[in-house]
C-alpha cells in the first residue's frame, strides 16, 4: 500500500499551453471537472498537505495547467475548471484551444481523472466533457468528490449512480476524511 506520509508532493510549474509543459517521463493524470468541484482539495488530500494547491471558494480561479510531482512516481495536472469562470469569450476560446491541444497531444498522459461533486446529480457540462473524452477515446477514471458531505447511508447510492451513468473506474474521495486516499494512490502509482 502507498503510505500517505511518504508521498512527497510538490508544485512544479504552471503552463498555459502544451509547449510550456514540463519535459519528463512520469505518468501524468490531468484533473478535469467543474469549477469548485474540489480539484485543489483532491491534490492536497492525496499529498497530505493542505497548503500544496491553493483552494478557493470563488469558482474559476485556476487559469493555467498546474503540475504537481508526487514522489517522482506520477504527476497530477490541475486544469482550469469548466463552468463558472468570469472571463471574456476570447479568453474562454483560447483556454479551450490550449486545453484540447494539451489533452490530445501530451504523450505523458496515462489517464484523465474526471471529478464529480457527490452532493449533486451529474451536471450537463460533466456529461458534455465525458462525451468529448469518449469521442477521442481517451482513458478516463471518475472520482466522486465531497463524499464527506454525503450521508453514509447514501454513499453507495451515489457511487452506483455515477457508475451507471459513466461506467469504468469510479472512486469516492473526501478531503476531510482520508479513508479513500490509499486506493486512489495505489491506482495512480501502478
Image (cartoon, rainbow, N blue to C red):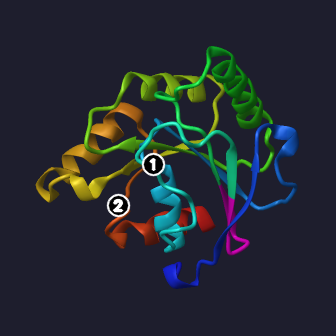
Q: Residue at x 53, y 78 (%)?
A: 2
At mark 1, the secondary structure is loop
Left or right of 35: which side holds 122? left
Of all residues shown, which one is farthest toward the left? 153
- Say which residue label 2 marks: 174
Mark 1, residues whose alpha carbon is within 10 Å: few (<14), some, or many (≥20)? few
- Say which residue label 1 marks: 169
Q: Residue at x 24, y 44 (%)?
A: 158
- Where residue 122 appears, as percent x and y from the top left, is 33, 31
- Where residue 21 appears, as percent x and y from the top left, is 82, 48
Q: Residue at x 16, y 58 (%)?
A: 152
- Where residue 11 appears, as percent x and y from the top left, is 68, 64
| Magenta segment, prevailing SS (helix, strand or loop) | strand
Q: Earlier in the sequence, mark 2 or mark 1?
A: 1
Question: Marks 1 and 2: in contact by CB < 8 Å?
Answer: no
Q: Give 90 or 186, whichever is nearer the viewer.
A: 90
Magenta run includes residue 88: no
Left or right of 146: which side holds 126? right
Magenta run includes residue 69: yes
Q: Give 37 or 29, whichever is nearer the viewer.
A: 37
**Is residue 114 at least partly visible in the picture?**
yes
Vertical arrangement, residue 21 with respect to residue 133, above or below: below
- Image quarter for residue 91? top right
Give the magenta part as a residue range. 68-76
Circle on res. 97: none
Left or right of 138: which side holds 122? left
**Is residue 1 at least partly visible in the picture?**
no
Amino acid at each position: 500500500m502507498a503510505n500517505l506520509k511518504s508521498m512527497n508532493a510538490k508544485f512544479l510549474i504552471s503552463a498555459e499551453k502544451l509547449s510550456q509543459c514540463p519535459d519528463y517521463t512520469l505518468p501524468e493524470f490531468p484533473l478535469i471537472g467543474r469549477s469548485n468541484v474540489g480539484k485543489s482539495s483532491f491534490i492536497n488530500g492525496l499529498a497530505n498537505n493542505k497548503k500544496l494547491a491553493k483552494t478557493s471558494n470563488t469558482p474559476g480561479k485556476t487559469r493555467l495547467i498546474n503540475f504537481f510531482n508526487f514522489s517522482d512516481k506520477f504527476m497530477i495536472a490541475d486544469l482550469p475548471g469548466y463552468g463558472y469562470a468570469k472571463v471574456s469569450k476570447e479568453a474562454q476560446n483560447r483556454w479551450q484551444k490550449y486545453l484540447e491541444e494539451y489533452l490530445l497531444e501530451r504523450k505523458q498522459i496515462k489517464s484523465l481523472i474526471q471529478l464529480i461533486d457527490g452532493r449533486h446529480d451529474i451536471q450537463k457540462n460533466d456529461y458534455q466533457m465525458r462525451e468529448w473524452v469518449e469521442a477521442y477515446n481517451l482513458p478516463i477514471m471518475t472520482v466522486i468528490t465531497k463524499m464527506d458531505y454525503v450521508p453514509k447511508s447514501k454513499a453507495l447510492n451515489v457511487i452506483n449512480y455515477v457508475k451507471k451513468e459513466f461506467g469504468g473506474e469510479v472512486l469516492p474521495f473526501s478531503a476531510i476524511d482520508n479513508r479513500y486516499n490509499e486506493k486512489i494512490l495505489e491506482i495512480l502509482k501502478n
